[in-house]
Image: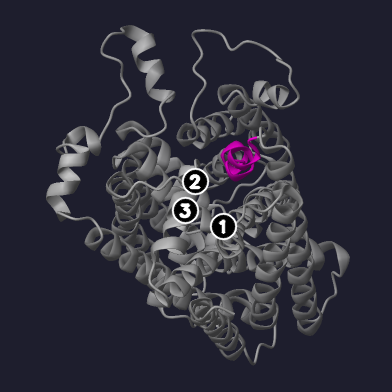
């Protein structure tokens, strides 16, 4: 084995040993479902903060955000981070207190208290289906690093079958390693390994940024000369076309991904749904000892998003400048693969292994939180009420561990299917559809939760199910989903009316929430009480 490859492999092996050892040690002595799902509510707020950051940072972020900076050569993507700060403040004062008051393990138990079992079952099922698809598909992105590494070592591009085996093999390896400490250690193992993984991810990003900057001769002057001066339009855009008037001018705003309006409005709804109604995110907030420290970890994670996103976008912009100064004919055509290409071919030995560990850290961090949340939701919402209503604490603990194993296997199936579709049928853009699937469903979740929190006598099980369905249908139409699906099979379902915009993803949850909430409040609740809120 090449000595340089041996050093990088040793660094990567050390990372895996460290993560699994810490996960197993921190997750020992669990006696019941509360220990597994909530860590006994004894986790420090700063560890919860790191876990939130790790949970929302996937391998897609590690590659995708630099890809946005490389392709767009600006920081307009950063506008979406503005709404995440506002949303986290709202979530911390609207959602967290009811969850603590009702002492829920699965946040969908709150809907049972407010509306009834059917609403809880619908919300839990939507979460489990959406999270399984989205998190499983993200595993495909992490395999990009191994595919490019294989190409670097062999000196030839792998064939279609070889690439598929690499992707599936790396997916299986990541899931098995993550499932070991997640199954045995529960949420404590997840949070403490998330803390290490977030540190590695952020540290490796800063190292890459410094190395890129030092590799550009002339430094800042060269960057400005290549890019041009930086102005307000590099950070903020409105999406409004000055050449148009009336509705046509406003309509264009919804058809641009990154605008100040999408950041302040659309992104606020996105984050309220992902951090207020998604078991994956909320579960780690509920491990803090009390409401005050839970709020602190959530709000601080929003403030941390700004420098993190800015760092990854800066990496993308510097990559563009670097490859302008040092042209590379082997540079991948896909912007999302550019950062990985730089890591493998330009990073010093050892640091390259650390950066690859950072890639796996992001994948394992988001995966561990997902399968832990899925297992908790299944056990609390389905196993205990239906499969074994008389379950003992020991039986529930055994059930949640087995659920973790089964969801890990399902993740492998989803990731392998995604890899097959993308590799064998390269024209099928499955990644944007599957990774954005929460945009179709989470507006319905948020709308029902808001109906329960902000009204006393509106909303019931039947009305909520109707509202969630209508919310999904409206978002599907506004996003052009039926036509996209028909296009995959070479057909065309219908033509979008000229007055109706085909909205970009930052707006999907916003309109899904508004529609779901508006329909849900048309129905009168049969329950007289109203859970207390902050």
Quadrant containing the C terminus in the rendered view: bottom left
Question: Which segment is the magenta one?
Answer: 429-441
Whether residues under marks 2 and 3 lie with C-beta atoms below 8 angstroms apart, the answer is: no
Q: Which mark is residue 63?
A: 3
> Which dot, 1 or 3, sits closer to the camera?
1
Query: Disc 1 or 3, which lies upstream in sequence?
Result: 3
Residue shown at the point (44%, 69%) measured from the top left: 355
Q: Residues within 10 Å of mark 2 (few under 14, many from 20)?
A: some
User: Which of pointers 2 and 3 indicates the residue nearer the eye?
Assistant: 2
Mark 2 or mark 3: whose residue is earlier in sequence: 3
Residue that appears at 28% across and 9% down: 243
Pointer 2: what residue?
332
- Residue 217 lies, with reference to residue 394, above or below; the image says above
**Mark 1 — residue?**
148
Where residue 360 appears, as percent x and y from the top left, is 54, 68
Label 2, label 1: how far apart the Cα atoms are = 10 Å
């Amino acid at each position: 084995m090449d000595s340089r490859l041996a050093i990088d492999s040793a660094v990567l092996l050390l990372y895996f040993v460290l993560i699994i050892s810490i996960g197993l040690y921190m997750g020992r002595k669990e006696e019941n479902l509360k220990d597994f799902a909530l860590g006994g509510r004894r986790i420090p707020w700063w560890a919860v903060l790191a876990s939130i950051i790790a949970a929302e940072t996937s391998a897609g972020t590690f590659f995708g955000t630099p890809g946005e900076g490389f392709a767009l050569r600006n920081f307009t993507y950063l506008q979406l981070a503005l709404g995440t700060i506002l949303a986290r403040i709202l979530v911390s004062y609207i959602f967290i207190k009811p969850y603590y008051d009702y002492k829920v393990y699965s946040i969908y138990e709150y809907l049972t208290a407010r509306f009834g079992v059917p609403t809880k079952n619908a919300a839990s099922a939507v979460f489990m289906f959406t999270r399984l698809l989205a998190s499983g598909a993200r595993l495909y992105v992490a395999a990009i690093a191994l595919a490019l590494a294989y190409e670097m070592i062999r000196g030839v591009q792998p064939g279609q079958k070889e690439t598929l085996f690499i992707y599936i093999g790396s997916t299986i390896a990541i899931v098995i390693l993550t499932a070991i400490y997640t199954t045995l250690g529960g949420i404590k193992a997840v949070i403490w390994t998330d803390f290490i993984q977030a540190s590695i991810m952020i540290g490796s990003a800063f190292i890459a940024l410094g190395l890129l900057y030092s590799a550009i001769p002339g430094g800042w002057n060269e960057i400005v000369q290549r890019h041009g001066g930086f102005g307000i339009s590099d950070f903020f855009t409105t999406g409004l076309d000055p050449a148009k008037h009336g509705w046509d001018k406003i309509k264009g705003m919804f058809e641009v991904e990154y605008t100040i309006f999408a950041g302040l409005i659309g992104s606020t709804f996105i984050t309220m749904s992902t951090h207020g109604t998604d078991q994956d995110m909320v579960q780690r907030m509920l491990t803090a000892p009390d409401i005050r420290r839970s709020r602190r970890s959530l709000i601080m994670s929003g403030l941390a998003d700004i420098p993190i996103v800015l760092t990854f976008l800066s990496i993308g912009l510097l990559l563009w400048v670097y490859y302008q100064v040092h042209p590379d004919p082997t540079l991948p055509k896909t912007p999302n693969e550019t950062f990985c290409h730089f890591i493998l071919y330009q990073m010093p030995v050892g640091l390259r292994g650390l950066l690859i560990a950072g890639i796996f850290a992001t994948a394992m961090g988001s995966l561990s939180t997902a399968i832990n949340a899925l297992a908790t939701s299944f056990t609390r919402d389905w196993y205990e009420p239906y499969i074994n209503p008389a379950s003992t604490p020991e039986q529930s603990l055994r059930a949640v561990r087995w659920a973790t194993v089964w969801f890990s296997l399902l993740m492998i199936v989803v990731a392998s299917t995604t890899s097959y579709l993308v590799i064998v049928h390269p024209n099928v853009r499955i990644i944007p559809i599957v990774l954005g699937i929460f945009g179709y469903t989470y507006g319905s979740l948020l709308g029902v939760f808001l109906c329960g929190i902000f009204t006393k006598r509106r909303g019931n099980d039947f009305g909520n199910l109707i509202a969630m369905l209508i919310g999904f249908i409206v978002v599907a139409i506004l996003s052009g989903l039926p036509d996209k699906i028909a296009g995959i099979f070479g057909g065309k379902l219908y033509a979008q009316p000229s007055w109706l915009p085909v909205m970009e993803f930052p707006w999907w949850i916003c309109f899904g929430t508004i529609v779901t909430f508006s329909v849900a409040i048309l129905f009168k609740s049969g329950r007289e009480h109203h859970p207390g809120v902050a």
